[in-house]
Amino acid sequence: MNKIIFPVSVPVNAVSCSFFFAGMLFPAYHFFMTYGYIRVSTSRQTVANQKFEISEFCVRNGLAVDSWIEETISGTVDPSRRELGRLLSDIKRGDIIICSELSRLGRSLFMIMSILNILMEKGARVWTIKDNYRLGDDIQSKVLAFAFGISAEIERNLISQRTKEALERKKSEGVRLGRPPGSASEKSKLDGAELSVSVMVCSGTSINRIAKLLGTHRKTVKLFIEKKNLASETGMERVRALWSAP
């Protein structure tokens, strides 16, 4: 009969044996992770209070945080540009995110609902301490996930509709939208790209095509060309001279 030899560095006890055999019998089995998520808006704030609160909560509920995610960033920043975005991408079914309150996830209702919808669809659990939410893989949470998704979509449409209505109202009141005449900024986002734009103008590239290549509006390109005098004969000659220089 073959013997199972454990590495010397691994203590042989009931716990280590159970994990060893679980790994042999269920190699693809996912052990649930518990994440402690902490966010503060400025460096003047401390993460210590939230971390203590989450740690105490875990002790009371027989849990242990496997990984801490701490970040100093405004809750208005899109999750994709935060550490939270990476967590949303990596989290698996059954994993738990514990935070002090829902406002740590985001500052707007729309953002919070969108985040919760993602987590509920992935089968992850979200527990908050102050709000006392326990969202998980149960029928109530699935109903909430559906509600969050619908609410987020409604909120997105309402924002778009309110913006359109506000613009229409301003137009009906005779308010001129956009930058006031004569208030154009002295600087342009194309500053420093004179040679590139000149070459494209000289080669006959259309303004629309230049705008698309540079990722800006055609009016911005047109104003830049006029301001820098890039379409004049002098401008053309300057470009040809630079282009043909050794």
Image (cartoon, rainbow, N blue to C red):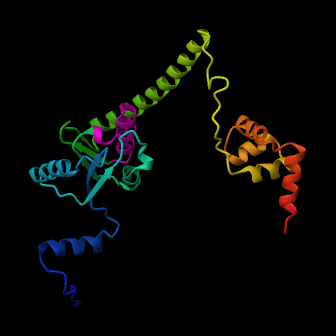
User: Magenta region, mostly helix, strand or loop?
Assistant: helix
Q: Please, is residue 168 above or below residue 121 in the view? A: above
| Residue at x 40% of width, y 28% of height | 151
Q: Please provide percent x and percent y for residue 155.
A: 43, 27
The part of the chain drawn in magenta is: 103-123
Q: Name the residue nearer the viewer: 180 or 158.
A: 180
Q: Please provide percent x and percent y for residue 114.
A: 40, 38
Residue 208 appears in view: yes
| Residue at x 27% of width, y 62% of height | 31
Q: Name the residue nearer the viewer: 216 or 63.
A: 216
Q: In screen coordinates, is 207 left or right of 130? A: right
| Residue at x 73% of width, y 40% of height | 224
Q: In screen coordinates, is 25 left or right of 176? A: left
| Residue at x 53% of width, y 17% of height | 166
Residue 33 appears in view: no
Q: What is the residue that sits farthest to the left in this orientation? A: 60
Q: Please, is residue 39 above or below residue 150 in the view? A: below
Which quadrant is home to the N terminus? Answer: bottom left
Q: Please provide percent x and percent y for residue 239.
A: 84, 54
Which quadrant is home to the C terminus? Answer: bottom right
Q: What is the residue that sits farthest to the top in this orientation? A: 173
Is residue 116 shown in magenta?
A: yes
Q: Please, is residue 109 above or below residue 33 in the view? A: above
